[in-house]
C-alpha cells in the first residue's frame, strides 16, 4: 500500500477518479467546489493524495496542513473497494505521513433525530478503532450541524487551530462557505462518550 501525492500542476490520470469519487461519496451540502480544493494545493496548504494497492487505485485523501495541524478534510475509498480494510490502511499511512503534527478530523455527531444516525455511529466507531479519539471539542458548522473533533491517539489541540486552518485555506470566503466555531465539550474527551 502506498500514498502518492498528486501534483496540481501535473496532468495525472488520478484527477478524474478523485473527482468522480468525491462527487459520489460526499453529499452536496458537505462538498466545496472541486476547483477550489485543487487550487489550494498550489499554495501547499492542502494535499490531494491517492491510495494505491500495488498499481490499483483505491481512494484518496484531502488534507489541510500548517506547522502544527494536519486536518483530514476528505477521505474516501472507491465504492468497489470498501469493506476490505483500505480505510484503516489509509489512516495508518497518513499518520506516518503527518508524524510530528496533530492529526485531526471531524465526524458528524450521533443524533437520534438525524436520518443518517446509523451511518454517523458507524463512522465514529471506525475512527475510534483507528485511534482517533474525541478531543474534548466539537464544531458547529453550516446549518448548525455539529461535528465531533477527533485527534489521533487523543492528541491535545488548541481549539483555535481548526478555525485558523480553515480560514488559511478558504480566506474571506470561509465564513460563507464553511462557518466554524469550536466549543468545549464537557461530556466527551479522549474517546470517552457519555
Image (cartoon, grey):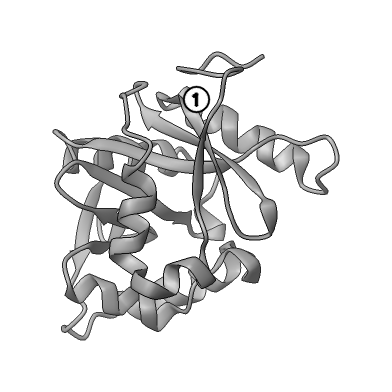
Rendered residue at 49%/72% (across/down):
32
Determine whether the residue tagged by mark 1 lies in a helix, strand or loop. helix
Rendered residue at 70%/34% (across/down):
110
With respect to residue 86, does 130 lie above or below?
above
Give the left or right position of residue 54, taking residue 19 as reference.
Answer: left
Give the left or right position of residue 28, taking residue 116 as reference.
Answer: left
Image coordinates of residue 80 in percent, x first then y, are: 55, 58
Rendered residue at 56%/59% (across/down):
79
Rendered residue at 28%/63% (across/down):
168
Image coordinates of residue 46 in percent, x first then y, are: 25, 63
Residue 38 visible, this angle: yes
Q: Within 10 Å of the Cα at label 1, are there few (<14), some (14-19), or many (20+) other Cα atoms?
A: some
Q: How many marks?
A: 1
Question: 190 and 34: which one is in front?
Answer: 190
Q: Which residue is mark 1?
A: 128
Give the left or right position of residue 51, taking residue 133 as reference.
Answer: left
Image coordinates of residue 76 in percent, x first then y, are: 47, 56
With respect to residue 57, does 115 lie above or below?
above
Residue 53 visible, this angle: no
Q: Where, quadrant-wise, is the C terminus in this rendering?
A: top right
Question: 14 and 42: which one is in front?
Answer: 42
With respect to residue 150, does 18 lie above or below?
below
Please tell me in which quadrant of the rendered image residue 160 appears: top left
Amino acid at each position: 500500500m502506498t500514498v502518492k501525492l498528486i501534483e496540481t500542476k501535473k496532468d495525472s490520470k488520478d484527477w478524474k477518479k478523485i473527482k468522480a469519487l468525491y462527487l459520489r461519496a460526499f453529499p452536496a451540502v458537505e462538498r466545496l467546489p472541486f476547483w477550489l480544493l485543487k487550487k489550494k494545493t498550489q499554495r501547499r496548504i492542502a494535499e490531494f493524495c491517492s491510495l494505491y494497492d500495488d498499481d490499483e487505485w483505491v481512494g484518496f485523501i484531502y488534507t489541510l496542513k500548517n506547522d502544527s495541524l494536519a486536518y483530514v478534510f476528505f477521505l474516501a475509498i472507491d465504492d468497489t473497494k470498501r469493506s476490505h480494510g483500505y480505510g484503516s490502511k489509509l489512516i495508518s499511512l497518513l499518520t506516518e505521513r503527518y508524524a510530528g503534527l496533530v492529526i485531526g478530523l471531524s465526524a458528524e455527531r450521533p443524533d437520534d433525530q438525524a436520518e443518517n444516525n446509523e451511518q454517523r455511529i458507524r463512522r465514529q466507531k471506525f475512527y475510534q478503532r483507528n485511534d482517533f479519539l474525541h478531543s474534548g471539542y466539537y464544531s458547529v458548522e453550516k446549518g448548525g450541524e455539529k461535528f465531533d473533533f477527533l485527534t489521533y491517539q487523543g492528541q491535545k489541540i488548541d481549539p483555535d487551530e481548526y478555525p485558523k486552518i480553515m480560514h488559511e485555506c478558504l480566506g474571506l470566503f470561509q465564513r460563507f462557505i464553511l462557518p466554524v466555531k469550536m466549543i468545549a465539550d464537557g461530556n466527551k474527551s479522549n474517546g470517552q462518550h457519555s
